[in-house]
């Protein structure tokens, strides 16, 4: 793995303590090549794209569209036309929900299945779609081990199932959902059932081949893959995106406009109204190239080793409820400690230089399902080390001794 020295912010000190950043499921820190790519854009390329005839515009346009190609290759998309730049996972899901509401694909009584461990951004847009179309939102339950309940899911699939929306990895539990099987059964039940995969927590940690998965939509956020905030991608099957209506109107998403009619642009520009986040999209591509250079398999192996070390260390401390199974989890661990509020634990860890996330993690329905108010979450990235895990464990034990 690349040295943490490549991430300047990791040199931060919290008083006498070095920063140990274990809040990577919320956002990742940025390596020097990504930071340099942003500086290079504003120093060498800054211009609007696609319509300019001048030198800088041509350079910026070429870099922006090359970024689209980089994303397509990273996801193994069939075509660059399937890559729509967005502001993040939330924006991508909302885009899909909005255009589906404008289409004729949903009618009263159609069903949308989501997971109980879904992020709010994979719940609320579908609720809004239901309000507009009369569709019904149904949560898929969890097993007692807090994994995806495949038997319950199979029982819920019906001729009215119109959409299944599932996170590849739960941001609150860390559980890796059986997405290939979920998609297979949805399509077997009804080939026209749409499947959206929330890749916010998976894209930085595992290889993703959207064609092999067989889903209809895949979304992710750049800032969780070492890129800037305000960047992201919606991948959609070209034949599907081509038939769906546009969402926002304005420049770039049109071919011709008059006061009586408008002809919409081809993919992917039909869904990219206005000036895009040119710099952000170019830097997103730089981040994906960085991940590719590090090797996604090597990243996964490194993070899995850290996660196992943390899991076993928390077990050894004792008196801690670790949510989800020991195996088949992503690079994060959420815990609940009876008698200890998650915020108090997080605050003490912060004072010791350990950055973790506390709260409901934008998964309030899951917290209600579990009968808790929140958790303390440790999450890992390629720059974390075994010594950081050991210090986090020692600080956790020290903090709990103070709180219990």
Image (spheres, rainbow, N blue to C red):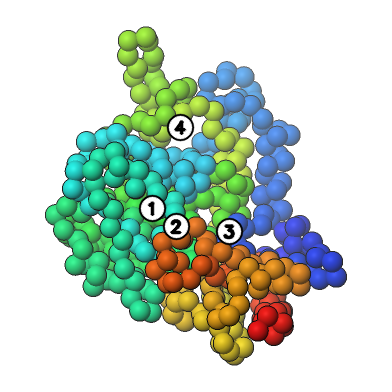
Q: Nearer the viewer, residue 112 or 303?
A: 112
- The mark nearer the N terminus, 2 or 3, is 3
Residue 171 percent across, percent down from the top left: 49, 63
In the picture of the structure, the residue carrying the numbered disc 2 is: 119
Disc 1 vs disc 2: Cβ atoms closer than 8 Å? yes
Query: Label 2, label 3: how many angstroms apart (C-alpha)?
Result: 12 Å
In the picture of the structure, the residue carrying the numbered disc 1 is: 123
For label 2, the SS is loop
For label 1, the SS is loop
- The mark nearer the N terminus, 4 or 3, is 3
Q: Residue at x 72, y 82 (%)?
A: 402
Query: Label 1, label 4: how many angstroms apart (C-alpha)?
Result: 24 Å
For label 3, the SS is loop
Q: Quadrant of residue 264?
A: top left
Using residue 101 as the reference point, say whether residue 396 is left or right of it.
right
Q: Nearer the viewer, mark 4 or mark 3?
A: 3
For residue 193, the mark is: none
- Say above or below: 224 vs 332: above
For label 4, the SS is loop
Residue 21 percent across, percent down from the top left: 68, 66
Query: Label 1, label 2: how many angstroms apart (C-alpha)?
Result: 7 Å
- The mark nearer the N terminus, 1 or 3, is 3
Query: Label 2, label 4: how many angstroms apart (C-alpha)?
Result: 25 Å
Using residue 42 as the reference point, say whether residue 377 is left or right of it.
left
Q: Residue at x 34, y 52 (%)?
A: 196
Mark 2 neighbour class, 10 Å CA radius: few under 14, some 14 to 19, many 20 or more: many
Query: Label 1, label 3: how many angstroms apart (C-alpha)?
Result: 18 Å
In the picture of the structure, the residue carrying the numbered disc 4 is: 272
Q: Nearer the viewer, mark 2 or mark 4?
A: 2
């Amino acid at each position: 793995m690349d040295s943490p020295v490549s991430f300047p912010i990791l040199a931060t000190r919290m008083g006498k303590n070095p920063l140990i950043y274990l809040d990577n499921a919320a956002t990742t820190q940025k390596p020097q090549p990504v930071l340099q790519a942003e500086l290079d854009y504003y120093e060498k390329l800054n211009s609007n794209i696609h319509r300019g005839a001048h030198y800088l515009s041509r350079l910026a346009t070429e870099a922006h569209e090359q970024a689209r190609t980089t994303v397509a290759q990273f996801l193994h998309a069939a075509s660059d036309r399937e890559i729509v730049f967005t502001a993040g996972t939330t924006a991508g899901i909302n885009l899909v929900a909005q255009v589906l509401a404008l289409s004729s694909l949903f009618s009263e009584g159609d069903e949308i299945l989501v997971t109980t461990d879904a992020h709010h951004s994979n719940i609320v847009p579908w609720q809004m779609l239901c309000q507009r179309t009369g569709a019904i939102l149904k949560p898929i339950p969890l097993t007692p081990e807090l994994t995806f309940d495949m038997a319950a899911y199979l029982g819920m699939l019906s001729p009215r199932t119109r959409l299944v929306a599932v996170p590849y990895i739960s941001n609150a539990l860390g559980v890796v959902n059986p997405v290939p099987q979920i998609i297979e059964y949805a399509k077997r039940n009804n080939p026209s059932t749409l499947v959206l995969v929330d890749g916010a927590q998976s894209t930085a940690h595992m290889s993703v081949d959207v064609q092999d998965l067989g889903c209809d939509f895949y979304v992710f956020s750049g800032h969780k893959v070492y890129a800037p905030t305000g960047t992201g991608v919606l991948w959609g099957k070209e034949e599907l995106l081509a038939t769906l209506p546009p969402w926002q109107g304005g420049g770039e998403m049109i071919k011709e406009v008059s006061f009586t009619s408008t002809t919409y642009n081809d993919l992917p520009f039909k869904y990219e109204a206005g000036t895009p986040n040119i710099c952000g999209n170019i830097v997103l591509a730089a981040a994906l190239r960085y991940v590719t250079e590090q090797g996604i398999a090597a990243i996964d192996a490194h993070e899995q080793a850290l996660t196992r070390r943390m899991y076993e260390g928390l077990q050894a401390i004792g008196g801690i409820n670790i949510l989800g199974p020991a195996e088949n989890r992503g690079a994060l661990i959420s815990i609940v400690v009876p008698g200890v509020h998650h915020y108090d634990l997080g605050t003490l860890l912060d004072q010791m230089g350990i950055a973790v996330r506390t709260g409901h993690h934008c998964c309030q329905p899951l917290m209600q399902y579990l009968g808790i108010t929140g958790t303390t979450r440790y999450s890992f990235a390629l720059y974390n080390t075994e010594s950081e895990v050991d210090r986090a464990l020692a600080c956790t034990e020290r903090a709990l001794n103070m709180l219990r």
